[in-house]
């Protein structure tokens, strides 16, 4: 949830900054629009970076869980085969 809150904070901050910039801008309209565009682009880059970092982190966690699950499943199958072999050996001794 930290990345989601960060994203909301970034977007909210960008909107608030743009609104305040318009209200208190001492520049001409064209300069103000260019400045707002640049600021928006910078915020967009930050949001994309945050999202990519979040996605990479999530991907690593999924890979770790998948790896552990495969190892557990493999051990379970091995245990089943060992138990079957023991049962077969027991049956052979009984015959």
Image (spheres, rainbow, N blue to C red):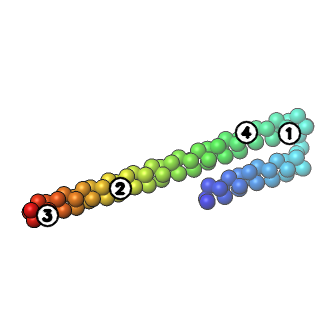
Q: Which disc, if any, is residue 90?
A: 3
Which structural element holds mark 2?
helix
- What residue is drawn where x is 31% and y is 58%? 76
Left or right: 62 in relation to 34: left
The answer to whether residue 64 is seen in the rendering is no
Among the two numbered marks 3 and 4 on one chain, the one whose residue lies closer to the N terminus = 4
| Residue at 37% from the left image edge and 52% from the top image edge | 70
Q: How far apart are the two marked residues, 3 and 2, measured between alpha carbons?
A: 26 Å
Classed neighbour count for the residue bearing mark 2: other residues with Cα under 10 Å, few (<14), some (14–19), many (≥20):
few
Can residue 7 be seen from the camera position used here?
yes
Q: In which quadrant of the rendered view does residue 79 lie?
A: bottom left
The label number, if any, that marks residue 41 in the structure image: 4
Query: Label 2, label 1: how many angstroms apart (C-alpha)?
Result: 61 Å
Secondary element at tag 4: helix
Camera-near label (2 vs 4) is 2
- Check the image and report above or below for 73 versus 30: below
Q: Residue 9 lies in what quarter of the image?
A: bottom right
Q: Secondary structure at mark 3?
A: helix
| Secondary structure found at label 1 | helix
Residue under pointer 1: 32
Residue corresponding to mark 2: 73
Question: Which of the two marks, 4 or 1, is nearer to us in this view?
Answer: 4
Could you say which is closer to the camera, residue 66 or residue 21?
A: 66
First-in-chain label (4 vs 1) = 1
* Residue count near mark 3 (Cα–Cα under 10 Å), binned few <14, some 14–19, many ≥20: few
Single out the mark in the foreground, 2 or 1.
2
Q: Which comes before the other along the chain, label 1 or label 3?
A: 1
């Amino acid at each position: 949830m930290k990345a989601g809150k960060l994203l909301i904070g970034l977007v909210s901050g960008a909107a608030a900054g743009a609104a305040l910039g318009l209200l208190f801008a001492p520049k001409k309209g064209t300069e103000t629009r260019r400045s707002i565009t640049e600021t928006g682009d910078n915020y967009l880059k930050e949001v994309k970076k945050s999202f990519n970092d979040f996605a990479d982190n999530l991907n690593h966690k999924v890979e770790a869980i998948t790896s552990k699950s495969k190892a557990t499943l493999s051990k379970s199958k091995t245990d089943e085969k060992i138990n079957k072999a023991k049962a077969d050996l027991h049956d052979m001794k009984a015959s």
